[in-house]
Image (tube, grey):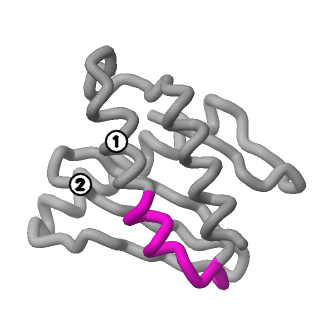
Amino acid sequence: MYQKDFNEGLAHLTANEYLVLAGTFHGVHAITSKISPAGTSFLVECDYFYSINVSFLITGTKFLILADPTHPNIDLVLRRTYDVYSDYVMKNPFYTPEMPIRSELFDINIVKLIKQVGS
């Protein structure tokens, strides 16, 4: 699990609330994948205030981004997040799959990605 807030002006969830959100999403995905196993790689659920954007990897890893529904580049953010994840997490010999991501290089490059796409 990896969580980072990029907009300092908004109210933030607690660590436990993020865990509940991730657990709930995982459970819903597990159930729906049994009902419809031929899923898509991107799922977007929109609300007036936010959108939930998800990328499912073949490894079982999921990227979940909560964003402004009017953000024009969320698909690009998801694709580039995978690139950063591949380069700085999966190529790290000390990373154990399914464990929390603790990588300074990953942090730095995710922040750089968000700044590039946001501008």
- In the image, what residue type sits under mark 1? Asp
Residue located 71% across and 34% down the image = 14
Which secondary structure, mark 1? helix
Question: Could you say which is closer to the camera, residue 49 or residue 73?
Answer: 73
Residue located 61% across and 69% down the image = 117
Residue 104 versus residue 86 in the image, above or below: above
Residue 6 versus residue 87 in the image, above or below: below
Q: Is residue 95 in the magenta section? A: no
Q: CA distance from mark 2 to mark 1?
A: 15 Å
The quadrant of the image that shows the C terminus is bottom right
Residue 15, numbered label: none
Residue lying furthest right in this view?
Answer: 9
Measured from the top left, where is residue 118 in percent x and y? 68, 69
Residue located 62% across and 30% down the image = 16
Q: Is the residue under label 1 in contact with that under label 2 (CB below 8 Å)?
A: no
Residue 50 versus residue 82 in the image, above or below: below
Residue 17 versus residue 39 in the image, above or below: above
Measured from the top left, where is residue 88 in percent x and y? 39, 36
Question: Could you say which is closer to the camera, residue 104 or residue 28?
Answer: 104
- Residue wearing tag 1: 87
- The quadrant holding residue 44 is bottom left
Residues shaded magenta: 69-80
> How busy is the neighbourhood of tag 1: few (under 14 within 10 Å), some, or many (20 plus)?
some
Which secondary structure, mark 2? loop
Q: Is residue 79 in the magenta section? A: yes
Left/right of residue 39 with respect to residue 87 in the rendered view = left
Residue 57, numbered label: 2
Left/right of residue 66 with respect to residue 57 in the rendered view = right
If you read the primary sequence from the N terminus, does the residue marked by circle 2 or circle 1 appear first? Answer: 2
Measured from the top left, where is residue 101 in percent x and y? 45, 28
